[in-house]
Amino acid sequence: MPSPLIDRISIELGAQEPWPKDVKLFQPYEVEQILLPDNANCLAVQAFLKMCNLEFQVEPRSNAEFMSPTGKVPFIKAGRFVMAELEGIVQFVNGKGISLTDGLDNEQKSDLRAYMTLVRNVIEIAELYICWIDRETYNEVTSVRNGSVYPWPLNHIQNREKKNQVIKKLKVLDWYNKTLEEVHQEVESCCEALSVRLDNKQYFFNGGPTELDALVFGHLFTILTTPLPRNDLAEIVRRYPSLINLVKKIEVEYFKKDSRRL
């Protein structure tokens, strides 16, 4: 895996070049393969790039996760440079003089980072829990979709390896032994904090959308529109009208052509 120094040099070199017209965003196949947390992160990056008015083309690949330099999706190929995940892509875009946070002061930028971390540490981890630990969701959705692009018995091997990886991560984060009710409470507390911060404004900060809005949109829109055996997460999100309004606004404003409508 590339070192932070190599990543920083790559970003600095990439900043010297204009945004290419043939940028590709790589992700798993949406219809038959992608899972809830990956779909949320891919949609968050798409929203961020659209907010920056940057052109890109979605390129579905069955092995996108294994192609990524970090082992996570999505990732973009912009000319000679490959950058993965929202934070890395934001940094790369910022290096080109394009930023959604120029109007924020240091305190606001600190708030932005804190709430992005909250979403990562709660909502995304809850999505992993639901997909891989909740037995009903795993049997009916996760095992089918995650293994759909592999022949038997490779699909079973891939599912087992991926599940073991997720279990290790959840154990480190002290989420593995949580009950489903405790997971729901964590998500509700996170949504409450986000709703209070949003305070019925159009976006989290008055100057317009930022990568925080993109990240929240990606996760909440995916939770609201993904059919699962359990709709508990969606029901929790629907209790917060200001968050629903944010999601709807971003969907209409930036995804008009391919809007799925809440």
Image (cartoon, rainbow, N blue to C red):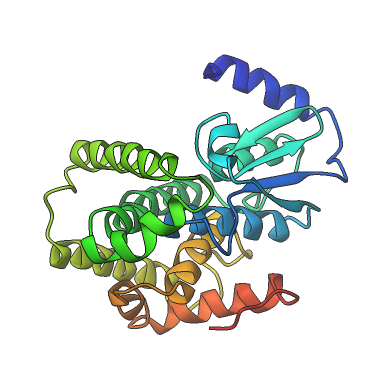
Q: Is residue 36 above or below residue 160?
A: below
Pinpoint residue 106: horizontal percent, then vertical percent.
Answer: 50, 44
Q: What residue appears at the point 70 percent right and 54 percent down from the top-left corner?
A: 49
Q: Nearer the viewer, residue 153 or 88?
A: 153
Residue 238 pos. (x, y %): 37, 82
Vertical side of 165 occupied by 56: above or below: below
In front here: 4 or 124? 124
Count of numbered labels shown in the rendering: 0
Q: Position of residue 40 (x, y in %)?
A: 49, 59
Q: Position of residue 225 (x, y in %)?
A: 48, 75
Towards the viewer: 39 or 119: 39
Q: Is residue 28 left or right of residue 99?
A: left
Relative to 241, is 99 on the left or the right?
right
The correct choice, above or below, for 167 with respect to 34 in the image is above
Query: Is 80 situated left or right of 134 in this image?
Result: right
Seen from this angle, which residue lies furthest front? Answer: 152
Residue depicted at 50% across the width and 48% down the height: 109
